[in-house]
Amino acid sequence: MVEAKYLSMKYEKGGRYALENLNFHIDRGEFVFFVGSSGAGKSTLLKLIIREIKPTDGVLKIFGRNVSRLPRHRLPYLRRNIGMVFQDFRLMEERSAFDNVAFAMVVTGASRREIRKRVPHVLSLVGLQNKAKARVCDLSGGELQRVGLARAIANRPAMIIADEPTGNLDPGTTLDIMNLLRSINLRGTTVLVATHNREIVDRFKKRVLYLENGKLVGDEQKGIYAHVH
Amino acid sequence: MLMFISGFFYIIGETVKGLYRNRWMCITSTGVVVVTLFMLGIFMLVNINLGHITDTVKEQVEIVVYIDDDAEQESLDELRQKLLSHSDIDTVTYVSSEEHMARLHRQLGGMLEGYDTELENPLLASYEIKTVVPESVVALAGEFETYPAVANVFYGHGYVESLFAVTGVAQMVGLALMAGLSITAVFLISHTIKLTVMMRKREISIMKYVGATNWFIRWPFVLEGLLMGFAGAVLSLVGLYYLYQYSVEWVAANNLAFLNLLPVQAVLIELATYLVPLGTALGVLGSVFSMGRFLRV
């Protein structure tokens, strides 16, 4: 599903590597944490996966396709297969929870009937069945991230990418969100989470890829955060 | 087909919602379009009417070719033939010496009483010539002066050359000002719309992340730009209508007949054919170009 071979990324020519010579393989249905301190390269790696940026060297294959060679007009179709969850939620604030989730479906050309059926369903999956009409700016942090998750799974993507999804949440809500991600993973969706939250990594005991100064310094099944150092 | 219909309704809905959600920014952008096109419209009104007034003055320019009393029939025929067949000449009117005298009587009223104007008529017969293009009078006058049957040629020497020079400069200045103002309008409007788009860059980046195609994102913005540009142009035309109507009435009330202004309806139609497409196109292009940067996510 995700395959990196000698993957490197430099933001500036002559500058330091944000990522250097990464080699790894992630299979369909896996749950993987990318851990490391700030500046380790976690966000860069996620940006490469959704082809927000292109690698400087090496190959990155997503769903078997080399993303560097993907023409710009095909990018939307790649992203429809990847649900994104962000630390700052990135929701359209003036709109309702329903509209935010529906929007992800509208762009794929889903019919209104389909949207009216699917959106309440995904909102109930994240526990927001009663908040469909609430405007995003009136929701709590935990509820906002649930809307973000509902949006990410609306199109039944093959993969969910979460960049510090609990960075702005209290411990109780963090656990709720992580449990939701786990239940999404149990339904067969690949989940990649970039985080430096020690507790959740240790608690969930999933595969962990350790990044340090742009290098992959460890790859452990059922890893724990302490192994970073 | 379902995809298309769903997308179509979405785009229309988003356009309306977008205009409502960003109403203050949209009102500002439309306001900038109104003010800029209104200013441009004033210049156009001045220029169109200046052109009309100079055309009217130019239409009155004519050549009078006076015929020599002693000219031989052959030379007279040659002159007449040339006048009738010349491609630069629009109309030729023969005025006999008697007709000239009658005109003189009419102009001077009773001042010629006591003169036997039928026996002693010193006035020469003439041809009064209207040219196809007013600017060709000088060259034509020079040409006919050389004919043996011609005693004298009159075309307002000196006055005509000055008239053409002044009107030429006035029109050039008018066109330059209009071009300058059009460019200013393009910059002002596109930059204001750019500001509207910039305020929504977060929204655009979210659309990109969930897999919206560039055109799917663009369409609502393009329609918003189109509506703002169109509304701005129409509102500026309403303002120009009242301003011009007032000007025409003021000129009539103050007996300034030499300011021969064009009728309101005709001018407004001419302005509309220029300002409405310009405003609409600026709205659309302003939206499309200012989005480019934010779509590269």
Image (spheres, coloured by chain):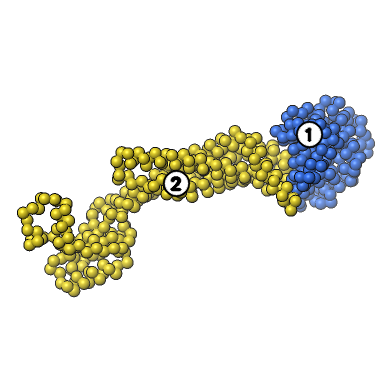
Direction left: furthest residue: B114
**Residue A36 found in image quarter:** top right
Colour representing chain A: blue
Q: What chain is colored yellow?
A: B
Q: Residues within 10 Å of mark 1 (few under 14, many from 20)?
A: some
| Local SS, label 2 | helix
In the rendered image, the quadrant that contains the C terminus of chain B is top right
**Which chain is mark 2 on?**
B
| Vertical position of residue A188 compared to residue A128: above or below | below
Q: Which numbered dot is residue B250?
A: none
At numbered mark 1, what does the secondary structure look like: helix, strand or loop?
A: loop
Label 1, on which residue? A132
Give whichever of A134, A67 is nearer the camera. Answer: A134
Q: Chain of mark 1?
A: A
The residue lying toward the viewer, choosing from A57 and B59, is: B59
Q: Residue at x 13, y 50 (%)?
A: B109
In the picture, residue B136 is in which quadrant? bottom left
Q: Residue furthest bottom?
A: B74
Residue A228 in view: no
Vertical relation: A137 (above or below) B204: above
Label 2 sits on residue: B268
Q: Residue at x 91, y 33 (%)?
A: A204
Give the residue type at disc 1: Ala
Can residue B254 be seen in the rendering of this structure?
A: yes
The image position of residue B138, as x and y in percent, is: 27, 59
* Residues at marks 1 and 2 on the same chain: no
Kind of residue sitting beneath label 2: Leu
| Label 1, label 2: how far apart the Cα atoms are | 51 Å
Q: Which residue sits at x=76%, y=31%? A: A134
